[in-house]
Image (cartoon, grey):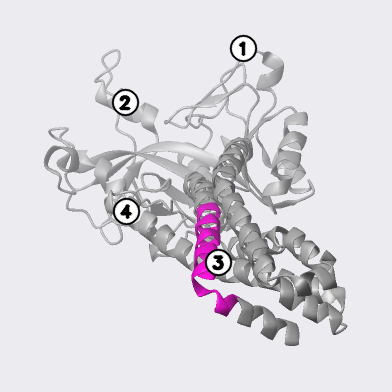
Amino acid sequence: MDLLRLSSSSLLKRKVRTILTVLGVTIGVASIVVMVSLGLGLNKSSLEQMESYGSLTAITVYEPGTYYVSTGDASSSSDASEEEKRLDDALVETIRQIPHVEMVSPILNVSVLARCGIYESYVYVQGMSAEAFEAMKIPLGEGHYPDGKDGVLEFFYGNMALQSFYVSSTGSYPYYDRGELPDIDLMNDPIFYIFDMDAYYQSQSGSSGGTATAPPKRYMVKTSGMVAGGEEEWNSFSYNVYCEIESLKSELKRIFKNKAIPGQPTTQSGKPYKEIFYNQIYVDVDSIENVAEVQNAINAMGYQASSNAEWVESTQTQYRYIQLVLGGIGAVSLLVAAIGITNTMMMSIYERTKEIGIMKVLGCDLRNIQMMFLLEAGYIGLIGGAVGLAFSYGVSAVINRVVQSMGNAMTLSYIPPWLALLSLVFAVLVGMVAGFFPSLRAMRLSPLAAIRSE
């Protein structure tokens, strides 16, 4: 306790020199914290952006050698052996048994024609399990997620789904032509759907061989809810329509009966399979660290699995390099501050040589003398670190406000709690390291020579 009192009183006796030295530490700490915070902010913003496109722990499974287009149809490779690898219920159960897999949902895509009053829209419907809605973090606005209870098919609309409706008689889009949304209440207005698109196109093309093709039957589907957000608030779920997959499968089987469902494979004789195959399988993993392991296991089964894990890893590696470079630039300022602390402590020793000699003659322990000067240096580091950290928070807030005022919602500068704590500890350590050699000199001074000095 006496050492702490002596150290603090010595610093107060030389206020100007102490303030200037603390200012150097303040600038050094602020430089490092702000520079590192820029790298952390870029990394944080990139992860948030990636998560807006889909969960970072999600894996999407496809048939081998396939790609998917907006109609939901699959275009497969010419390899006949690969064509036999379908996405079916057996594969869903196999994937569910893989370690670290928390949830598996098959995904079935169909294209239908929606009609409401004078408006029409080609709608891309995606069926998935009820659990997938929360796993995919689809934001819920109105209503509720479709659950498929009692086998009733319900649609869950994206918040921008209305933009794709056009006037059936003219083909004009109210939203894109005039910036107005169609006068449709998706939650309450009756909306009819045509599922048999092949029959619809045939009926629209006129008669075939003198026989007119009857238009397909229309079906009314209730609305369960909508994605949260306004007409301009885009997210990755804004434009599609979603439903519970088992109710969708039941409805498709009822509508097409023994006919081939559009988008579904058929046998060589053109007959439909008894089972409905899926376009994708959504897999949710318990942690981002285990995504690569699960993805490799699915690829080893002969299927294509994709995720954001590789993108995340490469992006984070780039930002780690950026953080090192920025931190290195800031460290130069702290190095200069450390030199300033060393200079201050050396000057203090020269000025207090006689005091040190008297302390030694009176029998003061040499370690206590060294510790007194180390504490003085640590005080300088602590005060400079605290002021520098406070200054860093202010600079960070200004940077983020300027970025947001330019219309960018990203967080460019981010100071997590661990960085704040680490900066304080680092500042104290730098101060004590800088004061080590001066304190060693003070400890080794000859008592008699120190007393005789002027």
Residue 276 in percent (x, y) is at: 59, 37
Give the SS element for disc 4.
helix
Query: Mark 1: which amino acid?
Result: Ser
**Residue 81 appears left or right of 23:** right
- Which residue is labeled 1 in the image? 78
Give the SS element for disc 3.
helix
Locate the N terminus by quadrant.
Answer: bottom right
Residue 21 in percent (x, y) is at: 54, 63
Callout in the foreground (2, 1)? 1
Disc 2 crowd rating (10 Å Cα; few below 14, some 14-19, many 20+) is few
Say whether marks 3 and 4 touch (CB < 8 Å): no
Quadrant assignment, res 316: top right
Residue drawn at 51 percent across, 74 percent down: 15
Query: Mark 2: which amino acid?
Result: Tyr
Give the SS element for disc 1.
loop
Quadrant assignment, res 429: bottom right
Give the SS element for disc 2.
helix
- Which residue is labeled 2 in the image? 201
**Of pointers 4 and 1, the one earlier in the residue sequence:** 1
Separation of residues labelled 4 and 1 (CA atoms)? 54 Å
* First to last magenta residue range: 11-32
- Magenta highlight on residue 260: no
Separation of residues labelled 3 and 2 (CA atoms)? 76 Å
**Of pointers 3 and 2, the one earlier in the residue sequence:** 2
Residue 57 in percent (x, y) is at: 63, 48
Separation of residues labelled 3 and 4 (CA atoms)? 27 Å
